[in-house]
Image (tube, rainbow, N blue to C red):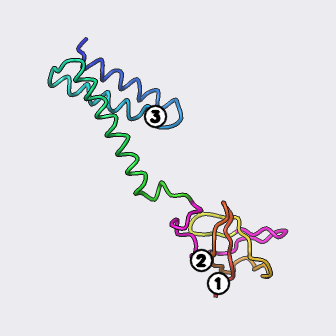
């Protein structure tokens, strides 16, 4: 079997294992192995150069994913200031036993009011002041 096909087969096995295991650890190794195999099908460098190609592709994939994670909203957490929840308006959907639920966008959230404020009624609009974990801190809008 040609060395390029062995690299491609190893990459496909890694990608298959990635489907079974959590995380993205084998994704970059699998893609780097497939890329190395494709290079070996076109040219015939020695084994040390093939390993260097694999390591370079692996490093490029990992660095690229880390850079992408830092620049996309997908990497942001819900309770960080840059997530953009503070200042938005929500609608109260239920008030039961002191527990408040609001709808913000297309999601329902647990919420609470700052001390000293009366509980709003369902349908009232509230403004998000802050986020405490997964609980919105809201105040009546207006």
Residues at circles 2 and 1 in contact by the CB criterion of under 8 Å: yes
Compare marks 1 and 3 and give the one earlier in the sequence: 3
- Label 1 – label 3 distance at C-alpha: 46 Å
| 23 left or right, relative to 51 | right
- At 32% from the left and 27% from the top, the residue drawn is 33
Image quadrant in which you'd find residue 135: bottom right
| Viewer-side residue, 90 vs 76 | 76
Residue topped by disc 2: 89
Residue 80 part of the magenta segment: yes
Tell which residue pokes out farthest to the bottom in this image.
Answer: 142
Indicate the quadrant containing the C terminus: top left, top right, bottom left or bottom right.
bottom right
Residue 37 part of the magenta segment: no
- At 63% from the left and 71% from the top, the residue drawn is 130
Q: Which residues are magenta?
A: 78-101
Residue topped by disc 1: 141
Compare marks 2 and 3 and give the one earlier in the sequence: 3
Residue 31 x, y percent position in the rendering = 34, 33
| Viewer-side residue, 134 vs 93 | 134
- At 30% from the left and 17% from the top, the residue drawn is 6
Residue 23 x, y percent position in the rendering = 51, 37
Residues at circles 2 and 3 in contact by the CB criterion of under 8 Å: no
- Label 2 – label 3 distance at C-alpha: 39 Å
Residue topped by disc 3: 25
Question: Secondary structure under badge 2?
Answer: strand
Residues at circles 1 and 3 in contact by the CB criterion of under 8 Å: no
């Amino acid at each position: 079997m040609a060395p390029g096909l062995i690299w491609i087969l190893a990459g496909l096995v890694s990608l298959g294992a990635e489907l079974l295991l959590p995380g993205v650890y084998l994704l970059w190794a699998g893609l780097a192995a497939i890329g190395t195999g494709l290079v070996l099908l076109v040219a015939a460098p020695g084994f040390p150069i093939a390993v260097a190609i694999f390591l370079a592709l692996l490093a490029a994939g990992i660095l690229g994913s880390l850079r992408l994670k830092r620049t996309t909203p997908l990497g942001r957490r819900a309770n960080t200031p840059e997530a953009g929840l503070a200042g938005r308006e929500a609608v109260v959907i239920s008030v039961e036993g002191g527990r408040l639920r609001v709808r913000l966008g297309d999601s329902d959230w647990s919420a609470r009011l700052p001390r000293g404020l009366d509980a709003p009624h369902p349908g009232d609009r509230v403004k998000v002041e802050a986020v405490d974990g997964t609980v919105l801190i809201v105040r009546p809008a207006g």
